[in-house]
Amino acid sequence: MGKLASHTPFTPPRVVHCGSLMALPLLGRTLSAAEARDGRMTGRCTHHIEFHDNVVIKRYRFWDRGEPGREWTALKLLAEHAPDIAPSPVQAMLDADPPTIVMSRIPGRVLRGVHLTAKQAEAVADALNRLHQEVPTQVVEKVEPAPHANLLWDKDSGRVRLIDWEDSGSNDRAFELGELIEHVSRIDGGFDEARLLAHIDLTPEEADRVPGFRRLVALGWFLEGAHANGRR
């Protein structure tokens, strides 16, 4: 199916956002009505998102790395093996132009630009522990390698859920934690890594490798920032 069927019972979108993994000034930028209607996206937006009452519609601007298929696969696997850790898959139009995925809308706000409380850090750890423990190893091994998603805090339930799975896949847990802790988004918030790591069920060998991956990821973001500013 190339388009959303006209009878699909979605309310008009309340908000349309432009999403980007790299361009910080564009992250969460609200599109104008004309952009939302025509699908125009500027800068380095990777997708745009329509928020409805009960669902979210995600349309991809780029899909050369199979991002829509990655996200749909992740949402289906999590719905089967670790329900309520991520949005539920509703509908996929992977062959449409642009590819589109519909998922359930979940409550909460992105954990960015804030200093994590002890409760939030524990909730992040709980979500990550469920991610790594409840999806069977034999299932993960069949998924193409890649990092995972962003964190959404629901203060009413005291839970963190994971969103944005277009670059999801199997990965090394120590590297994943290094990437999470040293992600560039920490520049506008606070992340108590010691508090988080205390709640993660790491093996001693994994714990020993996290600091090295943190340094690697931090260097990568430093070089990315220098490149973006035209420095060599």
Image: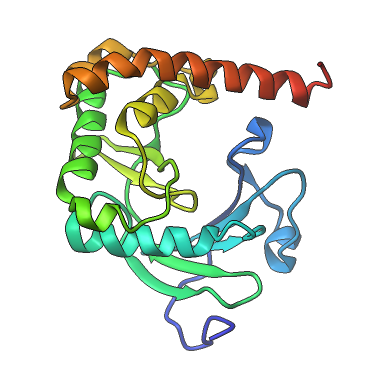
**Residue 85 on image: x %, y %:** 25, 49
Q: How many marks?
A: 0
- Pick the residue in front: 138 or 122: 138
Q: For the C terminus, which image quadrant?
A: top right
Rendered position, 227 above or below 136: above
At a point 34% along the width and 18% down the height, the residue shown is: 210
Rendered position, 14 above or below 102: above
Residue 63 placement: quadrant: bottom right
At a point 45% along the width and 83% down the height, the residue shown is: 8
- Pick the residue in front: 130 or 17: 130
**Residue 79 on image: x %, y %:** 24, 61
At a point 77% along the width and 49% down the height, the residue shown is: 42
Residue 211 placement: quadrant: top left
Rendered position, 222 above or below 108: above
**How is the model colour-coded?**
rainbow
Relative side of 78 to 178, left or right: left
Can see residue 74?
A: yes
**Residue 26 on image: x %, y %:** 67, 38
- Pick the residue in front: 103 or 231: 231
Rendered position, 188 above or below 39: above
Can see residue 83?
A: no
**Residue 135 on image: x %, y %:** 20, 52
> Which residue occupies the extreme right position in the image?
230
- Pick the residue in front: 58 or 157: 58
